[in-house]
Structure formats: structure tokens, C-alpha cells
Amino acid sequence: MTKLPPQEIPELDLREALDSLPSGILISDAQGVIVYCNETQSQIDGLSREWIIGRHVTELYVPSPLNSPILTALRTGQPVFDLFEMYETVHGRVVNSIHTVLPLSKNGRVSGCICLVTPADREPEAGEGSRIARNSILFSNLVGSSPAFRQSIDAALSAADSPSSVLIYGETGSGKELLARQLHDHSHRVNQPYVAINCSAIPSTLLEGMLFGSVKGAFTGAQNSPGLFEQAQGGTIYLDEVDSMPLDLQPKLLRVIQERRVRRVGAMEEKDLDIRIISSFSGEPLEAVQAGRVRADLFYRLGVVIINIPPLRERMTDLPGLISFFINKHTAILKKKTSGLTGEAMLILKHHHWPGNVRELENVIEGALNIIPDNGMIDVSHLPHYFRHLIIASPEPSAPGGAAFQPPRPALATPLPSPSAPLDSIGLFKPGRDEIMATMIAARGSITEAARRLGVSRQRLAYRLKKLGLTKEQFAI
């Protein structure tokens, strides 16, 4: 092959070439500010290139900066290959996509990155390899960007390497044990034992022996056996749901925590302990103390550092990032491909109350992935039956393949209140939860409009929303 002289090499218009690609392309500088966006990406996001260029990634997309593929590549200097990501633009468009991010370097330092975004319904090219390959750098086990959640995580990271006891409280399924494990993994004890016990799951007759150990003959069937405190020597012990521990055992636990010494049941001698103690309550700690379920002195010993994990319904902006995380996790386990969620399925997930919190969401995603066809999308029919009473989606079609979803306006699943609707104790209309949710959906999150439809004052509806743990942001579609 004859090599052309340099002056005869045709001049290439790189921008025109990038615009012709079927994948979206974003190029950022080292700080995460977008310096280039091709036409395909503009169409995927439904945002003009003029509006995108010059803005930081966090001004364009909803997911947490900690989980942004672009910011992760900039922070670590490592590429990200074929990662499924469901993200939401600041204008509310939800996109199911596959991301590949390549860091750019200059003089040995990361100077920016180039991000290729492919709608998740596109079939892979020959030789492209697995569509949903995983990159372990991208996701920590703590996904979220909402202010309350980030405040909790920041507090945890600050206290991670402290010897002080940490008390975590939050509803069941909100991620207390996950946070406890992260505290251990970010401490100097990371290579030492991590021992966890659910205090509510063990019969009270067995709990003392399990915690403190026993000597042979101390009680029927007892053997010389170290307890969990001894097994955690040098590391961390996590006591889950201490507010369910029997009251008669709490003084013994308090003594171990105070003196850092443990005596096996039936033994005479004590053993010194070098351990970090992390505990959790399933509800408000002070309520447990005031109700007499937990001794005040034990609470003060356990709660040197107190961290609250908000329930999922109070951090719904984290929903897309959590869904992406669980899809990546379980498609890897199940060895199955998916193109993400349909718009109708996402709409229902956004308006569910999530009483089981993040654990419930993970189960929903895992269950749906088990029954969808390979490379299919999670639709309403794949969700548990108890979701389907929430919303009847309008017949307006979603975008082809679900690659870019603009939420359709939902129809009411529950009729508006009638003159015979229930009254509260002072004779005023008292709408039920389903009725309020349906009306808030129809009003697109406007409390004023929903109050008008329900025939109550705005103040009264705002009070009812607060009592039900609902926020207007959940319904702003």
C-alpha cells in the first residue's frame, strides 16, 4: 500500500464524523464540565447542544455525582466499559442506556474524558462483547444523592475510623446493616472480624450465651464456647435492632460496653476486649427510651455518634440511581440482559410508597428480572400485583424501546371523593391515602390544585401529606 505524503491526507471534519455516529458522545474537561456534545446525545437527552455545552454534569443529570460514570472516570482515572445506566435529565426525561467512558490524559494527568452513550434497545455490533459488563469501581453499596441521605453518609464517613460507638436508626429495609458494614470497611479494623447479630431474631434464652459465650455445665447443653463479642476481638460487632433486646439483658450489655471486658456465662474470669461497637434501632431512639423498651444509660453508651437513614419515600430522587444499581447487580447474578424499564413501569415505581424501603425495591427489580425475556424491558406486568392499583397509565405510547421516556399523564385509579366520603372527628372531609395519591398524581404534584379537587384547604391537605409521609415531589411528573 502506497503511503500518501502528509500534504495529500484529506482534511477530516471531526465534528461532522462524531455527529454521524449512532451513539451519543459527551466530552468533559477534568472538572466534569461538558465541552462537546454530538447531535445524537442532544436527541437522546432532549436538550439542545447549546444548553448542554458549558454546564457541569451535575447540572444536567439527576443521579448522584458519586455514581456518575463521567465523574467516576475522572476521579479514578480508570475506564468504564458497557455499563447499564438509567439516568434522568434535569428536565425529567428518563433514559435507559449503555455507557462507556474513557479518561483522557495529558502529561500523565487526567485532563477530561469522552463518554459514549448508546440507547439500551440497540443490538450490539459484531464483536462488541457483553452489553452489560460490570465495572466494580462505579458503584459503592451506598447509592444516593438526596441531601438527607448524603448528610447521613458524610457523618458516617467522618466517624468511620473513630473508636466511638455508633448508633444507626431507620426503618426496616433502609440499609442500616449496609451502612454498618461500610463503617467497618472504612476503618483501620477492615482486616479484622466483622460480626453481626440481629437481637430481635434470637430467643432471649439463647441471646446471652450467644453474645457473651459459655462454659461447660453453665446450663443444660452448655459447652466451652466463645461468644460473639470474643469472636469480634480486634474488629467490629454490629448489634442490630437493640431496641428489641430483652430488658433483663440490657444491664449486662451495658457493663460489657462500659468496661470493654466480657465474662462467659458460668465463668469466673473476664477477658479484655478490643472492639468497635455499632448498633441499630428500628425506630426513633428517644421514643424507645421513653416507651421503656431501652434503658436510657444503654442508649447513651451506644449513641455516642447517632446516624439516621431516611426511608426511601423521603429520598425519591435517588430512585433512578438505585434502580440502575440493582439492575446491574442482578443481571450479573442472573446472567441476563435487559434494556431497562418502560415508562409506565417507572411511573408506578415513582409513586409507590415503599414501606419496605430499599430492600423492597431490590426485591422488586430482582423479581422482574427473573421473569422478563432476555434483553427485554421491565414493564408493569412484571411488577408485583400490589403495585397495579396505584396508577392506570394513559394510552399515550412511550418512546420506542423506552430509550427516552417522557412520563405520560396518568388517569385516576381511584375516583374523586363523593359527598358521602368519610368525615374526621370535627366533621371535615378526611381523604384516604389512595384517594390523596390519585388526586396528587392528577394534579401533577400541586398541593393547591389537589386541595381544590378534594374540596379541602391547602393547609389541611399539606398536613395530611405530612402525616402520611408523602411529599409533593413524589408526584411532580
Image (spheres, rainbow, N blue to C red):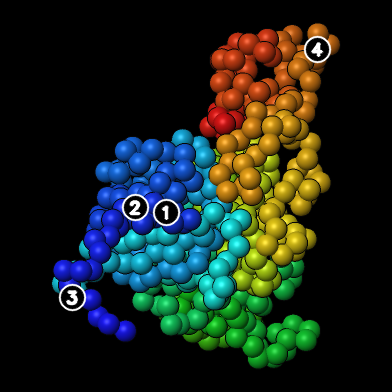
Q: Is 232 situated left or right of 160 in this image? A: right
Q: Which residue appears at 59% of the width and 15% of the height?
A: 449
Instruction: Identify residue for label 3.
Output: 5
User: What mark, if any, has residue 16 been given in the picture?
Assistant: 2
Query: Measured along the vertical axis of the image, is residue 173 above or below residue 61?
Result: below
Q: Are marks 1 and 2 in contact (CB under 8 Å)?
A: yes
| Secondary structure of residue under mark 4 | loop
Instruction: Identify residue for label 4.
Output: 418
The first of marks 4 and 1 along the sequence is 1
The percent position of residue 12, horizontal first and vertical second, equals 27, 60
| Secondary structure of residue under mark 2 | helix
| Secondary structure of residue under mark 1 | loop
Q: Are marks 4 and 1 in contact (CB under 8 Å)?
A: no
Instruction: Identify residue for label 1.
Output: 20
Q: In whole angstroms, how far apart are the C-alphas of marks 3 and 1? A: 28 Å
Q: Nearer the viewer, residue 137 or 80?
A: 80
Q: In whole angstroms, how far apart are the C-alphas of marks 4 and 1? A: 57 Å
Residue 263, quarter of picture: bottom right
